[in-house]
Image (cartoon, rainbow, N blue to C red):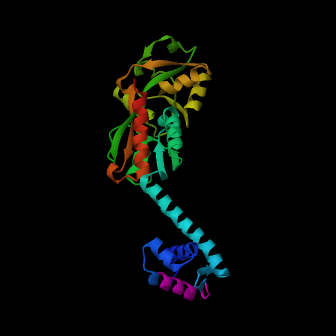
Amino acid sequence: MKLDPVSLKLFIAVVEEQGIGKAAERGHIAAAAISKRITELEITLGTQLLTRSHKGVEPTVAGIALLRLARQALHSLDEVHTQMLDYASGTRGQVRLFANISAITQFLPGDLARFAEEYPEIQLHLEERNSAVTMKAVAENAADVGIYTRQPHGDDIETRPYEEDELAVVLRRDHPLAVHKSLHLTDLLDWDFFGLRTGSAINSQLTEAAVRTGRTIRLRVQVTGYDALCLMVSAGLGIAIAPRHLVRLFVKRLNICEVKLAEPWARRELGICVRAHAELPTASSLLVKHLQQCANERKP
């Protein structure tokens, strides 16, 4: 016989009730069945656990030690069950989240902070990836949830709306174009650009839009983040295109300004993608619902 939770529970009941009969009443089980379990425990452990007399039973020194260990073991088993229920309900678990830099720098910090506060036992693993890589990672199950700039794709994923952002022209304040209230792409093509690293959605949009005009983008330097991009523009080394909401964070601190980009593709949709909503783990499903709720709360 191997030790099992039922036998340990019955042993604890016998010691606490100081008798097999009372333990049987408490557990709604036949006294003979309990007596057999205790005997098998003593045989398995190779020691006497109870001293029996006409007054009832008392634990031996070994029985007292087993009582303590049995309570600890059952408590640990209860904790296992509780934690597994947490995983089933989604209050415990982990989510692999890939997101593009626009989402990470504009919307996700506050949204994920609220999520972490509400579900402290869910671990979030966030990685910054461009939209194309994010969609591919979700399709290949390398990420559970992705935030990307919505665009036509061939990946086998399901999508939902998340947020909107608007691209603006980033200029040094003394730049000749800074006096304008709005600018078209054709107004910008004679100037050197700073852009994000290869593969970014903004780079792709700029390149495609320039090709439609019969021109090309003069992409001078590519950087890894919007902070570096704004610093380069502030130094007078070129112009850039970036999300308007984000640029405003740097306007007061740097020698830059933002001008409306008067192009239909300047307003962009950020989406949430998953492989299949019906198959999402509970923790991932909770994150998707939370992100959409946060986005809805920001709408006017």
Image location (x, y in percent) of residue 60: 65, 82
For the residue pair 266 and 45, the one nearer the viewer reads as 45
Residue 212 figure quarter: top left
Give the answer, above or below, for where 26 lies relative to 46.
above
Question: Which of these two is toward me, 97 or 176?
Answer: 97
Work out whether residue 137 or residue 147 is closer to the camera in this orientation and state it.
Answer: 147
Figure check: 257 above or below 110: above
Percent x, y of residue 134 = 43, 45
Measuring 64% from the left and 76% from the top, which residue is drawn there?
A: 64
Q: Give the overall secondary structure of the magenta segment.
A: helix
Q: Position of residue 168 (x, y in %)?
A: 46, 23
| Left or right position of 102 against 67 | left
One can see residue 299 in this view: yes
Where residue 139 appears, x then y in whole percent? Answer: 37, 51
Q: Nearer the viewer, residue 171 or 220?
A: 171
Quadrant in which residue 287 is drawn? top left
Q: Is residue 197 magenta?
A: no
Q: Which residues are magenta?
A: 34-48
| Location of the C terminus (image quadrant) | top left
| Farthest residue, direction right | 61
- Please state if 16 lies on the left or on the right of 167 as rendered: right
Magenta highlight on residue 47: yes
The residue sitting at 50% across, 46% down in the picture is 119
Q: Is residue 197 visible?
A: no
Where 25 sits versus 293, above or below? below
